[in-house]
Image (spheres, grey):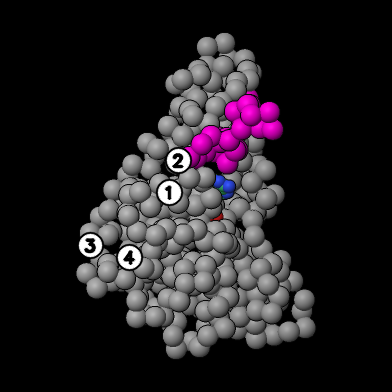
């Protein structure tokens, strides 16, 4: 893909996943936002899946890092490297063919950091670099008419943060963020297995357990014979130091998850309380949209409905809502979307 020039590019810079959309070509990159760097030379070894394979397995010459942690920039240089590496790969080193870059970022990023990201785009030779709030893009990408004079609420439960936003007339009226989301759930599963089963497990095992067993309400899953679904987890016995396997039950993981969701519940209630009354009234009809990877946890819809007492609906595209919204924004005029710093 080299022939075309003047292309618009959208980026969803998530804590867990980096997605890149190219106008007319679709989403050409959708991989973990992880980068591996050669410590001696500073050169990028790999990004995405290739870099993710190295997590926990590197020797001291290679460093594996996430450019965003807990929804905040851990290192702007790493963001530059990961974007440069992926864009270079997609555009076969022909970055001049990019005329516009729209980067969606978490709502909690400071103005200084926003400026740094815009500068970073300029540094790549893309003068028309804009930023947009991912909560807005996620709502748009999920099909919400965010431009209507009507309040909408979005909760994006991703890897590093859970973000809450009240939107009206195409703008974020109120937003809140908490560093409790997928990564934290994994960490709590690790702690639970350590305490209750005296077994040390890795991050990837914890994430798999979460995806296979997590739920917040409703019946626990059963197999064809009606037996409860359980999951094996391999780790290191804390006492003997030897590898050992255990079976985990969904009841155990639900308890862990419900504890994790307590603070999320508090922020949801605080957000509703602070929502201007006219917009709060709209939410009775428009409800709450849940998006982000962790909105796929079974029972989450009923869990939130029970708390907020208003309709809750799930994004049909939880993992791609932000990039889908980015794509829609790119199709619209600059006028609507230029974020003022
Ligand atoms: P970010 O925007 O922060 O990059 P994402 O919206 O891509 O995050 O979501 C990533 C998170 O979603 C990870 O913590 C991942 O483990 C979790 N996740 C992905 N699929 C599921 C699933 N089916 N059930 C529960 N959690 C999931
Ligand atoms: Mg996200």
Q: Earlier in the sequence, mark 2 or mark 3?
A: 2
Specify start and end residues of the magenta stretch as a single range: 206-234
Instruction: Point out residue 116 in the picture as x, y percentages from the top left corner.
Output: 43, 69
Residue name at image x 69 percent, y 49 percent? 50
Which of the two marks, 2 or 3, is nearer to us in this view?
Answer: 2
Q: Secondary structure at mark 4?
A: helix
Instruction: Point out residue 118 in the picture as x, y percentages from the top left corner.
Output: 47, 74
CB atoms of marks 1 and 2 within 8 Å: yes
Q: Secondary structure at mark 1?
A: helix
CB atoms of marks 3 and 1 within 8 Å: no
**Alpha-carbon span between mark 4 and mark 1:** 16 Å
- On screen, residue 41 above or below 283: above
State whether residue 255 appears in this view.
Answer: yes
Residue 274 bears which disc, if any? 3
Residue name at image x 35 percent, y 59 percent? 310
Check disc 4 and report the residue beneath it.
284
Residue 302 bears which disc, if any? 1
Q: Earlier in the sequence, mark 1 or mark 2?
A: 2
């Amino acid at each position: 893909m080299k022939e075309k020039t003047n292309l618009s590019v959208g980026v969803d810079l998530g804590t867990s996943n980096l997605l890149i959309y190219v106008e007319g070509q679709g989403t050409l990159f959708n991989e973990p936002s992880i980068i591996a760097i050669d410590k001696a030379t500073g050169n990028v070894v790999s990004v995405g899946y290739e870099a993710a394979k190295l997590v926990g397995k590197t020797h001291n010459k290679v460093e594996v890092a996430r450019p965003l942690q807990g929804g905040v920039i851990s290192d702007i240089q790493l963001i530059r490297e990961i974007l440069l590496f992926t864009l270079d790969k997609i555009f076969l080193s022909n970055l001049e063919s990019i005329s516009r870059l729209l980067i969606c970022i978490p709502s909690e990023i400071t103005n200084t950091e926003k400026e740094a990201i815009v500068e970073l785009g300029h540094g790549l030779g893309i003068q028309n670099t804009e930023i947009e709030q991912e909560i807005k893009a996620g709502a748009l990408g999920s099909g919400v008419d965010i431009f209507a004079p009507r309040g909408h609420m979005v909760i994006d439960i991703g890897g590093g943060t859970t973000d809450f936003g009240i939107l009206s007339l195409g703008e974020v009226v109120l937003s809140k963020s908490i560093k409790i989301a997928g990564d934290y759930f994994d960490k709590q599963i690790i702690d639970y297995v350590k305490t209750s089963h005296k077994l040390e497990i890795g991050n990837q095992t914890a994430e798999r357990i979460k995806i296979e067993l997590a739920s917040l309400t409703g019946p626990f899953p059963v197999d064809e014979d009606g037996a409860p679904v359980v999951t094996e987890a391999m780790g290191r016995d804390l006492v003997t130091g030897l590898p050992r396997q255990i079976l985990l039950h969904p009841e155990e993981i639900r308890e862990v998850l419900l504890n994790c969701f307590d603070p999320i519940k508090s922020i949801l209630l605080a957000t509703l309380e602070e929502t201007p009354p006219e917009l709060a009234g709209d939410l009775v009809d428009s409800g709450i949209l849940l998006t982000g990877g962790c909105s796929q946890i079974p029972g989450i819809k009923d869990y939130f409905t029970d708390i907020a007492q208003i309709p809750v609906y799930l994004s049909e595209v939880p993992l791609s809502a932000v990039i889908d919204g980015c794509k829609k924004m790119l199709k619209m005029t600059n006028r609507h979307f230029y974020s003022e710093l």
